[in-house]
């Protein structure tokens, strides 16, 4: 069998969409699993859609994701150049070869004429092969006169084209359904519809992974391979990623980019792990995989035909697992920028220890720490809690004893504080739950906090804890 060669072929049009990241990931996994090569190709032939710095974003994403390519514009390789705009002559040469063989033709039609071919019902434009019938002399004259032209694929009007996809199976279409796609544009650059075929062949790509939006054009590509007499690659089209049952996760959603998730405090490894599961099922219940483990387990047979729904809750859950596993120093260096949002000075190590096991994204930190800075005017109704049978009245009656006992605590640690509070509880015949609820509200003013009453006491320190207990009592 030929060597496995996969390619990730992004267009530098902005951020790295989650769908593109998934394509890159599957290409990487399949190549690595099969000891093949993973190639990065920049598809920049649509000059109008280009965005400055987008190529840098691609490199940065690949690096952050830990997916090192074996060949590409920056690392070189035997099949370069790997940037399509640097391959202009290659496409022109192959387009002319197709013209010579009758599988493509020059088209000089103006935009105005093409607009008249628009189907008013569907809004689709179907080219009528008008220029296919130009004589050699007419073509030569037009070219000599410098009339702008494109080169179009000459799709047969009859017969069918069948191709095989490793996910979607065999697909057959009537050739009359296919368009005479533009292969070479008037600026001399190829369209995706041409460049992907030429490059995948010349770069000896064995497996083409790409989004299923390309599935319907694949018969056109097949016809091109046939016209050149080239061997077809294996196709693996990937199901859509949806925001919900009806809507695709689109670039316009703004929140579907790798960068956005990084900015929201998700870890690259967790994002990648989650993305791997969007459309691929390891066929067991396992969900947590490092990149190396994914290489070991990834399998085309596990790719699903049905759309995958992007579930941020699940991503958060995976991210929390990765956060818990971080070495404490790494956690602190990433988390500490968020500590600046807290104005009451706290011991960073205690803060970090408390947060690491509780947050599911770094950006949760400011909200999680609100209880530190927003204490003064909290709602006293928080003491009314049926679950722990707590009430304002009860709080008012026990807080003086809690304060007196707390004042006597000398070594300020979890165990001792717990013992102290339990004793107060016994004195009033209260359940621990009741008492600890009251204390936690009295020192935080928040119903949910990143730790229990004693842990928060330790974090706040003796002085601040007592100050808050007293302030709460006063308000009651
Ligand atoms: N340049 C295409 C894109 O960014 C790549 C499609 C493919 O993987 O072939 O959508």
Image: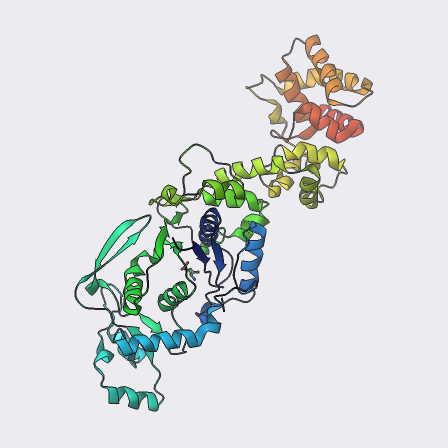
Quarter of the figure with residue 9: bottom left
Considering only vertical position in the picture, is 196 above or below 255? Answer: below
Q: Residue at x 28, y 61 (%)?
A: 219
Residue at 62 percent of width and 32 percent of height = 357
Viewer can see residue 48? yes
Give the quarter of the image for residue 395: top right
Farthest-out residue, front: 1
- Within the displayed image, which quadrant is ligand 1 positioned in? bottom left
Give coordinates of residue 293: x percent, y percent: 51, 40
Percent position (x, y) of residue 363? 61, 43
Q: Position of residue 408 (x, y in %)?
A: 82, 18
The residue lying toward the viewer, choosing from 460 and 241, is 241
Q: Quadrant of the C terminus?
A: top right
Residue at 38% across, 78% down: 186
Q: Using the image as rendered, state which of residue 6 and residue 133 is in the foreground.
A: 6
Q: Position of residue 446 (x, y in %)?
A: 63, 31
Q: Is residue 264 above or below residue 45?
A: above
Residue 96, quarter of the rendered image: bottom left
259 left or right of 4 in image: right
Q: Nearer the viewer, residue 379 or 62?
A: 62
Q: How many marks?
A: 0
- Residue 476 in view: no
Q: Which color scheme is applied?
A: rainbow
């Amino acid at each position: 069998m030929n060597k496995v060669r996969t390619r990730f072929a992004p267009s530098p049009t902005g951020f790295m969409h989650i769908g593109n990241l998934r394509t890159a990931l599957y290409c990487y996994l399949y190549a690595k699993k099969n000891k093949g090569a993973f190639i990065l190709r920049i598809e920049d032939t649509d000059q109008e859609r280009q965005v400055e710095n987008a190529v840098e974003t691609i490199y940065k994403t690949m690096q952050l994701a830990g997916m090192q390519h074996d060949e590409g514009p920056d690392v070189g390789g035997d099949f370069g150049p790997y940037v399509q705009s640097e391959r202009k002559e290659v496409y022109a040469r192959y387009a002319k070869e197709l013209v010579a063989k009758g599988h493509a033709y020059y088209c000089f039609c103006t935009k105005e004429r093409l607009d008249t071919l628009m189907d008013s019902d569907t809004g689709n434009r179907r080219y009528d092969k008008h220029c296919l019938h130009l004589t050699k002399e007419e073509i030569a004259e037009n070219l000599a006169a410098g009339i702008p032209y494109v080169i179009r694929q000459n799709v047969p009007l009859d017969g069918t084209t069948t191709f095989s996809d490793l996910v979607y199976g065999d697909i057959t279409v009537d050739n009359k359904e296919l368009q005479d796609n533009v292969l070479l544009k008037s600026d001399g650059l190829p369209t995706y519809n041409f460049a992907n075929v030429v490059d995948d062949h010349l770069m000896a790509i064995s497996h083409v992974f790409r989004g299923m939006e390309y599935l319907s054009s694949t018969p056109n590509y097949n016809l091109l391979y046939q016209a050149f007499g080239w061997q077809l690659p294996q196709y693996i089209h990937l199901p859509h990623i949806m925001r919900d049952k009806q809507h695709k996760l689109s670039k316009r959603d703004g929140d579907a980019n790798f960068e956005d998730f990084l900015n929201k405090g998700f870890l690259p490894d967790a994002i990648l792990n989650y993305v791997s599961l969007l459309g691929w099922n390891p066929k067991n219940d396992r969900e947590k995989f490092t990149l190396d483990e994914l290489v070991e387990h990834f399998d085309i047979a596990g790719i699903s035909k049905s759309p995958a729904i992007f579930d941020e809750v699940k991503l958060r859950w995976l991210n929390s697992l990765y956060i818990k596993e971080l070495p404490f120093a790494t956690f602190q260096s990433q988390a500490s920028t968020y500590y600046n949002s807290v104005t009451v000075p706290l011991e960073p190590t205690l803060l970090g220890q408390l947060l690491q096991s509780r947050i599911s994204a770094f950006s949760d930190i400011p909200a999680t720490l609100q209880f530190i800075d927003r204490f003064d005017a909290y709602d006293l109704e928080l003491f009314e809690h049926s679950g722990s049978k707590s009430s304002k009245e009860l709080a008012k009656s026990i807080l003086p004893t809690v304060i007196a006992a707390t004042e006597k605590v000398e070594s300020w640690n979890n165990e001792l504080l717990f013992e102290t509070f339990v004793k107060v509880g016994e004195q009033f015949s209260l359940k621990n739950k009741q008492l600890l609820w009251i204390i936690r509200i009295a020192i935080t003013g928040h119903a949910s906090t990143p730790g229990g009453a004693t842990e928060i006491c330790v974090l706040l320190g003796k002085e601040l804890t007592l100050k808050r207990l007293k302030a709460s009592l006063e308000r009651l």
